[in-house]
Image (tube, rainbow, N blue to C red):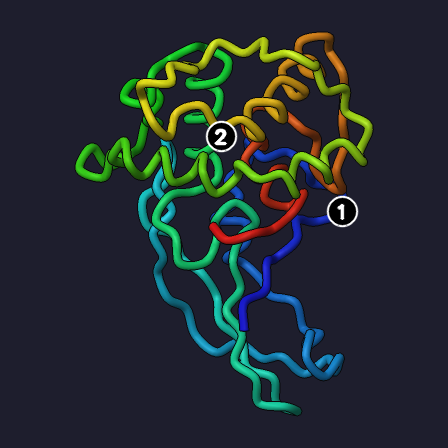
């Protein structure tokens, strides 16, 4: 079982070291049986590449009532993935806001040997490009422009680079952040650094 460790109530700043903070403690309430019976069950390492991280330490827990083993993940590292949501956010910003090609939209990472492939960035974007996510975003009342305004490539000769639903979502984000809007999704505030996390929390589909 995988559980994400929420940040402390007073801490909603992703600029702090979210990986180190999440590795310090674990919740004690079991999500399976609701007993306060989780004990520490060791640590392991996980890849979460971005500008500030390569491998991070994560905690494991064991419920002494139902005997479920739980892996605790920090909020910006999805299960079974090699790159953090901070890195994915940077790629989204480069492609949709800065107008970079997919080749130039790859994020900066701490380990130069772990720079993601262009196909990896394309897969990240495709995983977010869904009508379901767009519909959920519309329910949150972020203004959605009727026509594309972001700068990313829409060249039809380059398959897999238009991302029509994701592009509309990014238009709304650009409009919101561009006019200084503040959109809070507990406990975080939408920003370019939290963007990928926001979109995955918005409607968690396959990663």
Image x and y of residue 148, in percent: 59, 13
Residue appearing at x 38%, y 40% in the figure:
123
Q: Is residue 196 above or below residue 36?
A: above
Q: CA distance from mark 1 to mark 2?
A: 23 Å
Secondary structure of residue under mark 2: helix
Which numbered disc, 1 or 2, marks the residue closer to the eye?
2
- Please state if 81 lies on the left or on the right of 146 as rendered: left
According to the image, label 1 marks what residue?
9
Which quadrant of the structure image shows residue 139? Answer: top right
The mark that comes first in sequence, 1 or 2, is 1
- Please state if 163 lies on the left or on the right of 192 as rendered: left
Assess disc 2: are there few (<14), some (14-19) or many (≥20) residues with their C-alpha within 10 Å of its C-alpha.
many
> Which one is in front, 149 or 52?
149
Q: Is residue 49 above or below residue 71?
A: above
Residue appearing at x 54%, y 67% in the figure:
2
Secondary structure of residue under mark 1: loop
Image x and y of residue 72, in percent: 53, 64
- Please state if 113 lies on the left or on the right of 24 as rendered: left
Disc on res. 89? 2
Image x and y of residue 49, in percent: 34, 41
Q: Quadrant of the N terminus?
A: bottom right
> Which one is in front, 197 or 157?
157
Residue appearing at x 63%, y 90% in the figure:
66
């Amino acid at each position: 079982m995988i559980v994400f460790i929420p940040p402390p109530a007073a801490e909603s700043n992703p600029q702090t070291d979210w990986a180190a903070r999440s590795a310090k403690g674990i919740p004690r309430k079991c999500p399976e049986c609701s007993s306060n019976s989780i004990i520490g069950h060791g640590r392991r390492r996980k890849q979460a590449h971005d500008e500030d991280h390569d491998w991070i330490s994560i905690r494991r827990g064991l419920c002494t009532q139902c005997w479920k083993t739980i892996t605790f993940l920090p909020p910006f590292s999805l299960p079974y993935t090699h790159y953090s949501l901070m890195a994915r956010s940077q790629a989204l910003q480069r492609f949709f806001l800065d107008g970079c090609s997919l080749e130039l939209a790859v994020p900066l990472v701490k380990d130069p040997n772990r720079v993601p492939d262009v196909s990896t960035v394309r897969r990240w974007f495709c995983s977010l490009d869904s009508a379901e996510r767009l519909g959920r975003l519309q329910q949150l009342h972020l203004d959605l422009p009727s026509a594309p305004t972001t700068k990313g490539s829409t060249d039809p000769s380059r398959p897999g680079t238009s991302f029509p639903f994701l592009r509309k979502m990014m238009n709304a984000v650009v409009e919101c952040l561009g006019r200084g809007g503040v959109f809070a999704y507990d406990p975080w505030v939408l920003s370019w650094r939290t963007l990928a996390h926001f979109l995955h929390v918005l409607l968690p589909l396959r990663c």
